[in-house]
Image: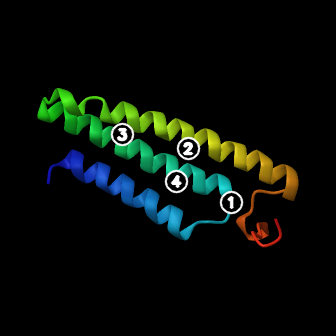
């Protein structure tokens, strides 16, 4: 495994562990998701450049578009949650109460 693959794998795993173990605020969960998407985007970009295949060149841009939609939906949920509950702490969110 080369150093670049190791770096992107480590960045993805760090984002995943941050999402799994540090879920106090919704904003920190969203940042962990964005770091995972960024490492996936960079890994797919380098992979399509190394393969020199033209049919894989649109995959990173498609992932980036979905990542932007996910970030917009996450921020909308963050704003809605902070307006209704007064904080973005995930402990205060009760799905049975909605």
Q: Earlier in the sequence, mark 2 or mark 1?
A: 1
Identify the disc placed on residue 6: none
Q: CA distance from mark 3 to mark 2?
A: 14 Å
The residue wearing badge 4 is 32
At x 45%, y 57%, the residue is: 15
Residue 70 badge: 2
Name the residue: 38% across, 60% down: 13
* Residue at image mark 3: 41
Residue count near mark 1 (Cα–Cα under 10 Å), binned few <14, some 14–19, many ≥20: some
Q: At x 81% / y 57%, what residue is drawn?
A: 87
Disc nearer the start of the sequence (3/1): 1
Mark 4 burial class by Cα count in 10 Å: few <14, some 14-19, many 20+: many
* 79 on left or right of 67: right
Distance (Cα) linking label 4 and label 3? 14 Å
Image quadrant where residue 88 sits: bottom right
Q: Secondary structure at mark 3?
A: helix
Tell which circle, 3 or 2, labels the residue nearer the N-terminal end: 3
Q: Position of residue 90 (x, y in %)?
A: 71, 65
The vertical placement of 63 against 92, above or below, is above
> 9 left or right of 17?
left
Disc 1 designates what residue?
A: 25
**In the rendered image of this protein, does residue 96 appear above or below residue 34?**
below
Q: In this orientation, which residue lies closer to the viewer: 83 or 39? A: 83
């Amino acid at each position: 495994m080369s150093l670049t693959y190791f770096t992107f794998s480590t960045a993805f795993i760090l984002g995943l562990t941050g999402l799994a173990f540090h879920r106090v605020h919704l904003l920190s969960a969203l940042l962990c998701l964005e770091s995972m998407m960024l490492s996936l985007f960079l890994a797919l970009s380098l992979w399509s450049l190394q393969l020199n295949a033209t049919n894989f060149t649109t995959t990173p841009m498609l992932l980036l578009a979905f990542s932007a939609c996910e970030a917009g939906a996450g921020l909308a949920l963050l704003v809605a949650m902070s307006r209704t509950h007064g904080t973005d702490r995930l402990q205060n969110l009760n799905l049975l109460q909605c």
